[in-house]
Image (cartoon, rainbow, N blue to C red):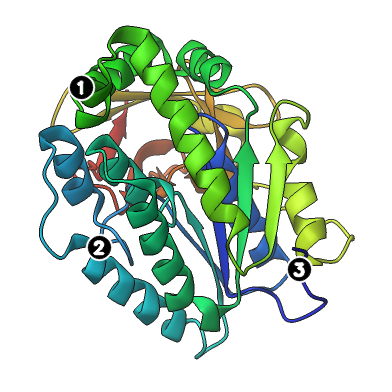
Amino acid sequence: MTIPNSPLPGLVLVEGLPGTGKSTTSHLLSLRLKRHGVNARWYYEHETPHPVFEYPEVQQALDHGQLRPGLFEDALGNWRALARSLDSPPACAVIESSFLQTAIHPMLLLDFDGERIGEYARQAAQAIETARPALVLLRHPDPGEALHQVAALRGDWFLDFLIGRVNRSRFAQHRGLEGLEAAIHYLRHYQALVDRIVAQLAMPVLPLPVDQIPKAEFVDRIANWLGLPETPPVVPCPSADLDALAGTYRDTGSQDCYHIVSNGTELLVDGAPPTPLIPTGALRFELLGTCVHFDFLPAADRSIQALDCIGNLPGLARQWVKQ
């Protein structure tokens, strides 16, 4: 189903397998909307408080195989409240993972039947219908290959983590599956279930085949689908010297460090892979794919001495001093 000519959806839902680019795409899409004058808000999957699911609670359910009674009933109420909040003033919320992934994984790992899971998804869709939702589905044709790609990107720890979680689940135990085979079988089952659910939704859906479209084009494709103007939005340029912002910043309460580097045109947090910092002001940047802002703090002589790290993440340290 395509987006009608108007109005812009109040909710843009971004879903897909792990590593398909949901967080990065959602973040960049929200920035694109803002630069076109839209009152947009991106909700990162792990941020807390979250309008629908508190991730620590979901994490506990995934770790221990037990759902809090009323968890999904509360989520439906939260979806309704969020939809109402988008009407006054008119706004657009970009939400990754929470519509399908965050709900389906706990149920599927506990081996709930597909009809029960599908019924929850239908109720969630009904709860948000007044917000004119639209769904972006980042889809990989081979979940097994997608798993290996995300492991290569994030590191072997992710593959071990996912295999361990699936192997401990009722889903794997009831089917006599273990090891990598269990994880791949699970992801294939998950994607097939998502495909069946999405086919029944009465909302516009944009499937993006991630094996055919470069990630750099995702936001352009979505913006075109949403009917945003073709004129490129104005991107803020930092007035500060990027090399002066680069350096090592240490958390004052631990030994944790951010190593920030400049390639001459942008700042990145060094890592595997490096993560770009998106400028949103002279000395303010957003860490791509997370709900974290970096405010670089100058001393009296205007040299950078520290940064404030601000975001709705549990345990996020605020003050980081330049070494």
Instruction: Give the residue at x 22% y 41%.
Output: 317
Instruction: Give the residue at x 65% y 27%.
Output: 141
For the N terminus, the quadrant is bottom right
Disc 1 or 2, which lies upstream in sequence?
2
SS under mark 2: helix
Q: Amino acid at mark 2?
A: Phe
Q: Eyeballing the image, is 77 above or below 231?
A: below
The image position of residue 171, as x and y in percent, is: 26, 30
SS under mark 1: helix
The image position of residue 173, as x and y in percent, is: 20, 22
Q: Eyeballing the image, is 66 above or below 80?
A: above
- Callout 2: 10 Å neighbours few (<14), some, many (20+)? some
Q: Which residue is mark 3?
A: 3
Near-viewer residue (237 or 91)? 91
Instruction: Give the residue at x 47% y 43%.
Output: 302
Left or right of 135 in this view: 96: left
Disc 3 or 1, which lies upstream in sequence?
3
The image position of residue 276, as x and y in percent, is: 57, 32
Disc 3 or 2, which lies upstream in sequence?
3
Instruction: Give the residue at x 39% y 26%.
Output: 186
For the C terminus, the quadrant is top left
- Callout 1: 10 Å neighbours few (<14), some, many (20+)? some
Q: Eyeballing the image, is 54 above or below 304?
A: below
Mark whose residue sits in front, 3 or 1 = 1
Measure how far apart labels 1 and 2 are at the Cα level: 24 Å
Q: Which residue is mark 1?
A: 173
Measure how far apart labels 3 and 2 are at the Cα level: 28 Å
The image position of residue 111, as x and y in percent, is: 26, 38
Mark whose residue sits in front, 1 or 2 = 1
Q: Which residue is mark 2?
A: 72
Near-viewer residue (285 or 305)? 285
Measure how far apart labels 3 and 1 are at the Cα level: 42 Å
